[in-house]
């Protein structure tokens, strides 16, 4: 990239917020996706306002240079990797909660706000921001909106797109557009807010978001159900969902993950189990008591040993154990390919069997955790990025996992997005017509292709 361009960026921002040293740039070459070779950007900018973001985008537009919006870099699909060099635009300096509005049960945030911080502030008003990815302690609002992140409460509360009511976005020509607002009902024209949620940084840079909050549940009951046979666990998921009880959380943890998490955290998990369900019901106390009893009964009928968390401390321990699944798996091997193929809820048992079969046939360790109540599983392949033969086997197995999910009426991604990692498979899910429409939307909004190139719209 020319020094002239760097000079233009320095004069648009401030010297301190334009990073050019190789050692600094290297930190932005990767995200949390395994096996991605990464690529250092030419420059990193840290704008502090919407106006500065717009200036950066206009400079990039004039020079025809790529811009990669970046939050915390925890994407699991290569979304934040600067695939073709150019400018990484980090939102780390735009981290203000601009407004917490209990009367309208919403918050207005800048993109660099960490999700957990919003939730801590919302809790002071008895409110909750439900989207809850396992990376909640570091992932940003901008990144999670751009990925339409889900998480551990998706079954009852839905995912990020169900909470975003307004956005401010800098589009590819440098214009600032404001879409939606605090109204929870809004059918004025196309759903432009919806277009940007889940657009993975390919259509615009989100510079502000208005999100809905909900009353925090009055009561919760959290329990684990340990199964001697993994098939019983997956059938239990289907039976709970079929019983018209909607737990807030219905997580599946397989035997490999269970053992590794226990080695890592010493949380007192039943390591002899073939599979564990982590279940939480929430709501008014009477409903919680009734639903917890139903869930326990269904689990026991399917042969599980059920244990309820006695207090908040025990509950926190269980949640920490679930959130530690990826770190625990990552300690075990040099790399992990975390997938999130998703199927209709009732097909979870078949999907779990398909994953076990694929692991056997490719002679791979595939540990599966997942938001089983959503049909959103995370088969995680333990790999070594330096072992070319192993990586090839792993990628072939992943392709088969996608095929199996699609054959069961599911899809490629429930929450991690497509990025670069799943781009080759997008046509399987969308068909030629859907892919063409995607590319036409991209071309209309970003004709030069400067926003996050090298990803699924490339
Ligand atoms: C341990 C671990 C657990 C995880 N658990 C979950 C989970 O349970 N559920 C889930 O859904 N995901 C999960 N993820 C994936 C990831 O954390 C989420 O997608 C997260 O929301 C990404 O946020 P981020 O700030 O790290 O974004 P980044 O990784 O920095 O960026 C993600 C994408 O958003 C774009 N982007 C970032 N900021 C903006 C912006 N302001 N405007 C426009 N585009 C932008 C980037 O270009 C990129 O394409 C997990 C990841 C890890 C490492």
Image (cartoon, rainbow, N blue to C red):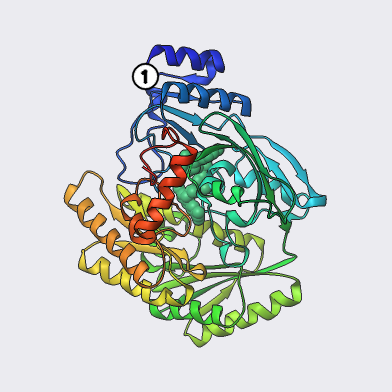
| In this rendering, position of residue 277 left or right of residue 395 | right
Residue 161, placed above or below residue 222:
above
Q: Quadrant of the C terminus?
A: top left
**Which residue is under mark 1?**
1
Please report the residue visible at 43 percent of the width from the left and 58 percent of the height from the top: 413
Q: In this view, does 299 lie above or below 58?
A: below
Depth check: 217 or 11 in front?
A: 11
Residue at point 61%, 51% (across, down): 190
Residue 57 or 368: which is nearer the viewer?
Answer: 57
- At horizontal 44% and vertical 57% (from top left) the residue drawn is 325
Left or right: 367 with respect to 364?
right
Q: Is mark 1 on a helix, strand or loop?
A: loop
Q: In which quarter of the image is residue 223?
A: bottom right
Confirm or reject: label 1 Cβ below 8 Å from ligand 1: no
Work out whether residue 229 can be spotted: no
Q: Residue at x 25, y 56 (%)?
A: 394
Q: Where is residue 200 in the image (x, y as percent from the top left)?
A: 48, 44
């Amino acid at each position: 990239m020319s020094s002239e361009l760097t000079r233009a960026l320095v004069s648009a921002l401030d010297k301190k917020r334009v990073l050019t040293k190789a050692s600094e740039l290297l930190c932005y070459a990767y995200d949390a996706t395994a096996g991605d070779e990464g690529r250092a950007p030419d420059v990193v900018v840290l704008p502090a306002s919407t106006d500065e973001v717009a200036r950066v985008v206009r400079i990039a537009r004039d020079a025809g240079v790529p811009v990669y919006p970046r939050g915390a870099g925890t994407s699991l699909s290569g979304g934040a990797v600067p695939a073709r060099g150019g400018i990484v635009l980090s939102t780390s300096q735009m981290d203000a909660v601009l407004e917490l509005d209990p009367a309208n049960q919403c918050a207005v945030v800048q993109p660099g706000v960490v999700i957990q911080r919003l939730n801590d502030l919302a809790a002071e008003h008895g409110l909750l921001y439900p989207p809850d990815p396992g990376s909640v302690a570091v992932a940003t609002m901008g990144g999670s909106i751009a990925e339409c992140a889900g998480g551990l409460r998706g079954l009852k509360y839905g995912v990020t797109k169900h909470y975003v009511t307004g956005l401010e976005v800098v589009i590819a020509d440098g214009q600032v557009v404001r879409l939606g607002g605090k109204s929870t009902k809004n059918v004025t024209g196309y759903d432009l807010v919806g277009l940007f949620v889940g657009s993975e940084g390919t259509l615009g840079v989100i510079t502000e978001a208005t999100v809905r909050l909900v009353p925090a549940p009055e009561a919760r009951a959290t329990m684990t159900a340990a199964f001697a046979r993994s098939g019983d666990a997956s059938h239990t998921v289907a039976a709970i969902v079929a019983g018209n009880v909607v737990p807030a959380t219905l997580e599946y943890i397989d035997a490999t993950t269970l053992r590794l998490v226990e080695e890592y955290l010493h949380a007192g998990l039943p390591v002899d189990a073939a599979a564990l369900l982590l279940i939480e019901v929430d709501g008014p106390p009477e409903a919680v008591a009734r639903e917890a009893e139903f869930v326990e009964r269904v689990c026991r009928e399917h042969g599980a040993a059920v244990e309820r968390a006695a207090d908040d401390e025990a509950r926190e321990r269980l949640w920490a154990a679930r959130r530690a699944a990826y770190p625990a798996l990552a300690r075990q091997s040099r790399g992990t390919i975390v997938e999130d193929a998703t199927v209709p809820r009732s097909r979870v048992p078949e999907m779990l069997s398909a994953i076990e079969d694929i692991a056997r046939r490719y002679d791979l360790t595939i540990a599966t955790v997942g938001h089983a109540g959503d049909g959103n599983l995370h088969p995680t392949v333990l790999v070594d990025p330096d072992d070319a033969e192993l990586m090839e086997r792993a990628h072939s197995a992943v392709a088969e996992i996608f095929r199996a999910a699609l054959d069961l009426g599911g899809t490629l991604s429930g929450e991690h997005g497509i990025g670069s990692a799943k781009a080759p498979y997008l046509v399987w899910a969308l068909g030629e017509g859907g892919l063409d429409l995607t590319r036409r939307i991209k071309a209309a909004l970003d004709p030069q292709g400067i926003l996050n190139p090298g990803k699924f719209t490339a």
